[in-house]
Amino acid sequence: MTPAVLPAVSYRDGRRRVKAKYFTQRGADQWVFHGKVVDGLGNLRPIYLYKTAQTVIRRHVQVRGLANPYDPACESYFEERLSVKMAGDLRRLRGPGWDALK
């Protein structure tokens, strides 16, 4: 369709319609992209787009320059790295309050 054929709707009206159809408010955030999906029981429930700002940034530790995973002399170094990584993974899986329960 060319702009001449479109109905006479102002920019502001179009923006309001788009906001009403595709966005909702959750807490203090007024522009949350959402949709509706049918769950396993046939109920219509809302789903929300994941906010990338909520992603926790995890830094990695650089491997030593002379370390070689195929060298038996470096085996203890790589075992230590693996154990630290696994401990961090378990901590994330268990949740923030897990250490307080010990």
Image (spheres, rainbow, N blue to C red):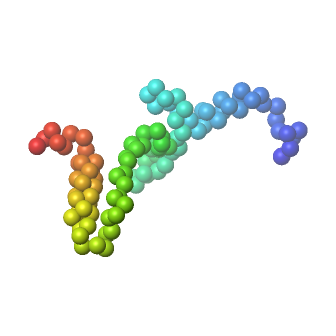
Frontmost residue, 51 versus 40 = 51
Direction from residue 31 to residue 76 in the image, left or right:
left
Name the residue at the left extreme. 102
Direction from residue 52 to residue 74 in the image, left or right:
left
Name the residue at the right extreme. 4
Direction from residue 11 to residue 63 in the image, left or right:
left
Q: Residue at x 25, y 44 (%)?
A: 95
Asked if residue 90 shows in the view, the reply is: no
Q: Quadrant of residue 5?
A: top right
Asked if residue 7 shows in the view, the reply is: yes
Q: Residue at x 26, y 51 (%)?
A: 88
Frontmost residue, 44 versus 21 = 21
Q: Residue at x 54, y 39 (%)?
A: 33
Residue 74: x, y in percent?
A: 26, 67
Residue 23: x, y in percent?
A: 56, 35
Q: Quadrant of residue 82?
A: bottom left
Name the residue at the front extreme. 66
Frontmost residue, 96 versus 26 = 96
Frontmost residue, 67 versus 23 = 67
Q: Quadrant of residue 98?
A: top left
Q: Residue at x 24, y 73 (%)?
A: 72
Residue 76: x, y in percent?
A: 21, 64
